[in-house]
Each structure stands twice: as C-alpha cells, then as structure tokens.
Amino acid sequence: QVQLVESGGGLVQAGGSLRLSCAASGRSFSSGRMGWFRQAPGKEREFVGAIRWSGGNTYYAADSVKGRFTISRDNAKNTVYLQMNSLKPEDTAVYYCAAQSVLYSDPEYPNLYDYWGQGTQVTVSS
C-alpha cells in the first residue's frame, strides 16, 4: 500500500520558518518526481515545487516561493522536505506532497501525480 505522510505543519509568525516532511512508503518512486502543492481556502491547488528522486533536480513555482522555499530529499529515508523561510501570511494553506510513479513531462500539474498525502496545515500569522 502506497503512503505519503506529511508532517511539520503548524502556526508560525510572519518571517518565521517551517520544515515540512513527506515520508513515502509502499513502492519506489525513483523514476519520477515528488511534488509539493498547497491549497488555501477558496482557491485552487497551487504548485509549490518538485524534486526528482534521481539526480535531485528541483523546480519551483515562478514567483511566489522562489528564493524562500527549498526542496530536498533523503533517498535512504524515502523522504522529501520542504524548507520554508521568510514565511508570509499568504503562504497560509494546506500543504500536500505528491508522487509521480514515472517521469511525466511537466512537474506543475496536479493531474500528473499518481499519489497524494493527506495534507498538513501551515498557518502564518501577521
């Protein structure tokens, strides 16, 4: 059974930092990417960033998080991390990790991910 389990969310003040983790189990995802998405109330799910298991290439949303968020992975632990610095109130959302079973062409589209975690709430207060 494939499982993606996120952890690390919580309440933080603006300017603070959080690190989210996503532990994958049940199968190998070495061929594809792990992605992070977020969804704020009343908004569509938004791409945050992604990383390839093989090689570690990273991709980030164009403007909203670049320079503040960093994605990394620990292949031995089958875990992907989202380090979030300089958090802003507009970063408040439920954050989801997702996995591609194979390498699809584009990391930004939710429908190109085969498995999803349950989400973890991040709340940034002003």
Image: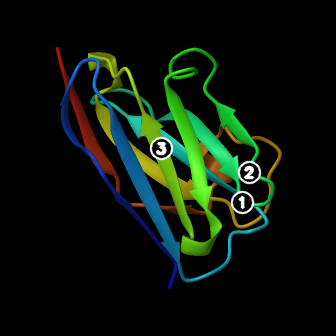
The percent coordinates of residue 18 (x first, y second) are: 33, 38
Residue carrying label 2: 56
**CA–CA distance in space, label 1 to label 3:** 14 Å
**The disc label shown at residue 45, or none:** none
The image shows residue 20, relative to residue 93, as above or below, that is: below
**The disc label shown at residue 53, or none:** 1
Q: Closest to the observer: 16 or 62?
A: 16
Within 10 Å of disc 1 (Cα), the crowding (few <14, some 14-19, many 20+) is: many
The answer to which quarter of the image holds residue 6 is bottom left
Q: Secondary structure at mark 2?
A: loop
The percent coordinates of residue 113 (x first, y second) are: 63, 55
Q: Secondary structure at mark 3?
A: strand
Q: Residue at x 45, y 39 (%)?
A: 83
50 left or right of 10?
right
The percent coordinates of residue 99 (x first, y second) are: 60, 60
Q: Residue at x 62, y 49 (%)?
A: 111
Q: Amino acid at mark 2?
A: Gly
Is label 1 in contact with label 2 (beta carbons under 8 Å)? yes
Residue carrying label 3: 82
Q: Residue at x 60, y 26 (%)?
A: 61
Within 10 Å of disc 2 (Cα), the crowding (few <14, some 14-19, many 20+) is: some
The answer to which quarter of the image holds residue 47 is top right
Q: Amino acid at mark 3?
A: Leu
**CA–CA distance in space, label 1 to label 2:** 6 Å
